[in-house]
Image: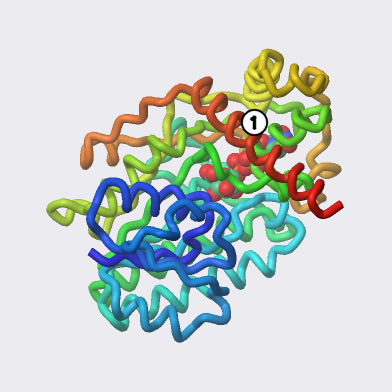
Amino acid sequence: MKVLILGVNGFIGSHLVGRILRDTDWEVFGLDLGTNKVEEHLGNPRFHFVEGDVTISKEWIEYHIKKCDVVLPLVAIATPKVYVTDPLRVFELDFEENLRVVRQCVKYKKRVVFPSTSEVYGMCPDAEFDEHESPLVTGPIPMNRWIYSTSKQLLDRVIWAYGFQHGLKFTLFRPFNWMGPKLDSLNTAKEGSSRLVTQFSWNLFNGEPLNLVDGGTARRCFIDVEDAMDGLMAVLRNEGGQADGQIFNIGNPANDYSVREIAEMMIAIWKDHPFRKERGIPEGRMVETGSGEFYGKGYQDVARRTPSIKRMQQTFGFAPKVSMQDSLRKAIDFFVEEHKALEKVVETEN
Ligand code: UGA
């Protein structure tokens, strides 16, 4: 099978290419702006990488859609800070660029596996969010945060409609707070615009307090990226066509924690971490911050977000295994290495 991954150097793309090369005989064609997360795979003859921008490399993309069997348009801005500060860029990239790709999949009759998001459920009141039953609840227009959710939601609906009216072969998967190595980068955390675990790691390494936005009461269910990849690979394999025309939440309802609990767990891991002791970096501490101050006034939070994973369980026997503790340790160890590498770059530049 030939797989096209647009945004292959992102968090999901980089882990996915690793899994595909390790576990299958498929070929991967990948496009991205950089290579830092896929460096280790560049020499693999089944990985064909091209450096480029999805907004510019239009001919390359169309040619490869024609050439490949399945397309994953993974390019997207996925950090809440940017939804608030640059909502138009989110719409243009996450919606407009991906719509073009989806339409070419329709034209060339190719299967599209599209990353929807847990954010489409927004402030849904259900105890567990179900792909076919739960309402999708977003906030008022002045709240920029919802542009990501609604851009993704509209594309979900467009893809569904192309399936309904034109026979497009598709699967929508919805990541629920996937975490692990390569989630964002410490450089984005430096600007305060990365997702939770990367942001807290950066704060710990720099002796800064962990910001508990609005008291840290918001809850998320986190899934280790390795468990998430088991799910995504089952979707991609699509044995017996079970994933066709389906929507799947991919998450781990067992790892349900508040932001404050995550901060406490990370502070505890950090306390005994050899890197902290070796460098004499202070132990972690927390501070409460208002969301307006932290994100800007277009931010509205999701108080809780729990996936129903019954469709993944019933269809593929999906069963996430990694505990939050183990996942956090692994992520922190990875970010420590990234931190050391960044320090080396700064030393060389100086
Ligand atoms: C994320 C992103 O929108 C997407 O990556 C994705 O679609 C989705 O969730 C997902 O991964 O399922 P969110 O979970 O709100 O949204 O993103 P985080 O930035 O990781 O924030 C999680 C919680 O931590 C929020 O309540 C936020 O306010 C809080 N937070 C974040 C803090 O209290 N302090 C920080 O320093 C950072």
> Which quadrant, please, contains the N terminus?
bottom left
Q: Where is residue 221 in the image (x, y as percent from the top left)?
A: 51, 31
Q: Image check: 235 left or right of 102?
A: left
Q: Residue 198, position in %: x, y? A: 65, 38
Q: How crowded is mark 1: few (under 14 residues within 10 Å), some or many (20 or more)?
A: some
Which residue is more in the foreground, 308 or 198? 198
Residue under label 1, please give it.
218
Out of 85 and 164, give the one closest to the viewer.
Answer: 85
Please name whichever residue, 189 or 50, is drawn nearer the observer in this view of the structure: 50
Residue 90 in view: yes
- Which percent across, then down, holds residue 71? 35, 67
User: In which quarter of the view is residue 335 placed?
Assistant: top right
Q: In this view, does 108 lie to the left or right of 294?
A: left
Q: In which quarter of the image is residue 321?
A: top left
Label 1 CB sits under 8 Å from any ligand 1 atom: yes
Q: Which residue is drawn at 17% across and 56% down?
A: 241
**Secondary structure beneath label 1:** loop
In the displayed structure image, the side of residue 213 where residue 257 appears, left or right: left
Here the colouring is rainbow
Left or right relative to 155: residue 296: right
Residue 151, horizontal then vertical, whole percent: 55, 63
Q: Is residue 145 above or below residue 53?
A: above
